[in-house]
Image (cartoon, helix red, strand yellow):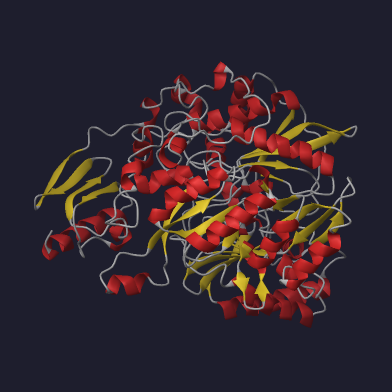
Amino acid sequence: MSHGDARGFKYLHRRLQNKKQGRLKIRHSGFSDGLPAPHRHRRNVFITVVSFYTSKHSFRFSDGLFKVSSSQTNIKQSTTMTDTTAADPRAKLPDAPLSDNERLKGQSRHLRGSIAEDLGDGLTGGFNGDNFQLIRFHGMYEQDDRDIRAERLEQKLEPNKNVMLRCRLPGGIIRPAQWLGIDEFAGEHTAYGTIRLTNRQTFQFHGVLKQNIKPMHQWLHKLGLDSIATAGDVNRNVLCTSNPVESRLHREAYEWAKKISEHLLPKTRAYAEIWLDGEKVESTATTAPAALPDSVRSGDATEPVLGANYLPRKFKTTVVIPPHNDVDLHANDLNFVAIEENGRLAGFNVLVGGGLSMEHGNRKTYPNTAREFGFVGLDKVLDCAAAVVSVQRDWGNRSDRKNAKTRYTIERVGEQTFIAEVERRMGAKFQALRPYTFTTRGDRIGWVEGEDKKWHLTLFIENGRIADYLGRPLKTGMREIAKIHKGDFRLTANQNLIVAGVSARDKAKIERIARAHGLISDGITRQRENSMACVALPTCPLAMAEAERFLPAFVGHVDGIMAAHGLTGEHIVLRVNGCPNGCGRTMLAEIGLVGKAPGRYNLYTGGNREGTRIPRLYKENITEPEILEILATWIADWAQHRNPEEGFGDFAVRSGITVPVLDAPRDFWAAA
């Protein structure tokens, strides 16, 4: 493609993109400076064929000529699903072409694609074509170091491509021997040498080069771990409240988290074939697989629950033990709230349709809290999980991925219609909700004694980043604890870590190691303990602003404001996202910052401490000094006029700083 052709292509691309229609499909065979920036990272090669599809026409550049033709082959969602319920008029599916993700999933041979062949391509550090998306189903995202991206491009080098891996760890429990293996791999085979704990109750490796990817999966396999379905359009890592005090109830809830994870896991052998040379993946299940009712089956023999095209979008599930909402259930599609009766786990209240991602300025997108469907006994938990997933599988929007999650499906078809279909598929009616309440969601930092007389130490890990910092060698400290610890480790949904099951005899020894390596510090404020950020720069390709690297210093400024007003022992649930995708769960914070551009954020307020209310936009596209000036005014007002025990978010609503979001689909975007 000549530079003139490139300019023509960029003009066409810009015109069509501005109209927000169509999709771009590119095939390459060499380097081109003319490729538009949004797509240049995909491969630095000459363009040989470019196709652009709209609802009416297709534009094709080939051999120096643009060709325009009618798009008569667009496939509508209502005619592509193999299950008969896909055409159910109650689903109100859009009469629009499927997104290109549906094509690539359908053509992937159950998530195999050409990943195995791509691993041998030494010309690029990344993955080609569909494999760029397909590796997500195997628990990985292709990334690069954005701190050095511009420098490498100036040198005519491709970005420093690598992958981030997220481990599957239902309930967040890991053995010390496994931790030692994770620590060794991170230190020897990743670019950053760190372990990142996430609020999905697992850990991530960042900066794994292509030649180390297959060895990484085999390394995890030897530890009894895998990364199946921790990304992609599947049920992700299942969360479970980290409650070491009520040991028996936690044990029961944790077993259900594992059962649900196994029940909803992809059944394809692609992961084992590509990464483990066909070896069987170790199961987390402790019982035989549950039978699957015909009413939830997809019609695909390989994937009876998820279907040949898997789910329309990511799907997140939790098991929650009230009154502790540490998993932020309203950030998730499917939630099982544990109900204890007469000293035993009786069943679960089921809440469906939570989620936090949105898009700046796109009023069709919004965060929302989960809806209460009812109670199910233990005998119906797995049937209920499969039923909810299968309804979303068949009724979810596969044309517009920004409206593809469960909360949008429920809003489109109606809550009662969705519930009725779930009941039909699980073969039972929901019972009346059992009483429950949430009072806290932060982790209890420090030592607590459990019902079993074992001790449990919750370590505050700022932003979940375990590294050897100057004067605080956290990674070394965790390694030394793992060498002697006889219990287990529990990763929390607040990016912290619990050293669980410590005997009274070993308690002092564990504490000495933790203090010597900076894992325990008496100077950590309540505010810092209740602040959280996503990873963002330099590794996340979606980040618009800093988050993890921004938060520590920012919290220091907030601490100063709190201290100036006599609030040193208080806290505000504060969260920062580098973009509006919601990974840092900002849309359940009392004060939330969402990245808009480098150094600029949208400021939200009005959530509550319990995590049951969505905050509202207060001011858009502002800098750190502007944010701190606003917070100084708010915190001074809160200190002077709050009611006893009143959290900041509730005060912000009561005092008129903002108005509550009561019906997110209709009032999230309304002005305060």
User: Quick check: can you spot residue 609?
Assistant: no
- Answer with the quarter of the image where residue 586 lies: bottom right
Q: Which residue is drawn at 46% across and 54% down?
A: 362
Task: Judge left or right: residue 65 versus residue 510.
Answer: left
Q: Nearer the viewer, residue 65 or 344?
A: 344
Q: In which quarter of the image is the C terminus?
A: bottom right
Residue 546 on image: x %, y %: 52, 70
Q: Residue at x 68, y 27 (%)?
A: 287
User: Quick check: can you spot residue 10?
Assistant: yes
| Total count of labels | 0
Residue 224 higher or lower than 530, as above or below: above
Residue found at the far front of this picture: 483
Q: Residue at x 48, y 22 (%)?
A: 85
Q: In which quarter of the image is the N terminus?
A: bottom left
Residue 66 on image: x %, y %: 12, 50
Residue 139 on image: x %, y %: 49, 46
Q: Nearer the viewer, residue 557 or 149?
A: 149
Residue 624 higher or lower than 47, as above or below: below
Task: Judge left or right: residue 90 versus residue 28.
Answer: right
Residue 451 on image: x %, y %: 89, 46
